[in-house]
Image (cartoon, grey):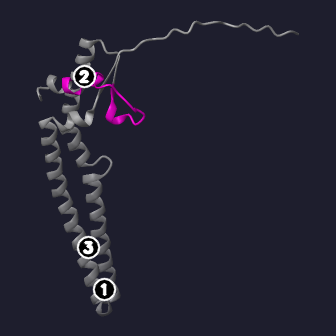
Amino acid sequence: MAFVGWAVATPLVAQKFSIAYIDMQYILKNLPQYETANEQLNMISKRWQKDIDAAQQQAKILVSNYQTEQIFLSQDMKQRREEEILAKEQEVLELKRKYFGQDGEWYKKREALLKPIQDEIYTAIQEIANEKGYDVVKDRSADPSLIYMSSKLDVSDQVLEKLGAK
């Protein structure tokens, strides 16, 4: 039985893309509304961290008091104090998770404050790409493989102008 193979020749066509770049970090740094949102997030974060620190301090005091008074306590009192310490430590963990956990309040607040700004940026980028005929717009601040880029390909300032920031 003989094997018959077919060779299919497909012409390699060089496709030409029109590419532009943005520097998202530069854009965000020059948007006042982004700075305002970040300040709000920092204030909220500091307030929540104070709550966590206060609860941690209370847990430390409970532990310290327990260690100091332990020899004078009955077995029943020791158990109650240990349960109180565990409950306070659990409260600290719960606060951390509630505020800064994966689905915590900080991430929800961040999403609420920054998503509208990101949407505006992406809309401005799309409009510029459509107006100028760019096929691809890449973020150079997120592209570690980018070694060199001509400044005439950078449309970051145009994005800022579209957003009214320049």
In the depicted structure, whether residue 16 falls above or below residue 48 = above
Span highlighted in magenta in the image: 138-158
Amino acid carrying mark 1 in the image: Gln
Question: Hey, which quadrant is residue 87 in on the image?
Answer: bottom left
Q: Can residue 115 be seen by looking at this rendering?
A: no
Residue, disc 3: 59
CA distance separating discs 1 and 2: 62 Å
Name the residue rendered at 23%, 78% in the picture. Answer: 61
Q: In this view, does 91 lie to the left or right of 8?
A: left
Q: Is mark 2 on a helix, strand or loop?
A: helix
Image position, residue 12 (x, y; %): 55, 9
In the depicted structure, whether residue 43 falls above or below residue 2 = below
Q: How would you rate the neighbour count of disc 1 (Cα within 10 Å): few for under 14, some for 14-19, many for 20 or more?
A: few
Q: Nearer the viewer, residue 49 or 158?
A: 158
Residue, disc 1: 67
Residue, disc 2: 125
CA distance separating discs 1 and 3: 12 Å
Amino acid carrying mark 3 in the image: Ala
Q: In this view, does 72 lie to the left or right of 11?
A: left
Q: Nearer the viewer, residue 52 or 76?
A: 52
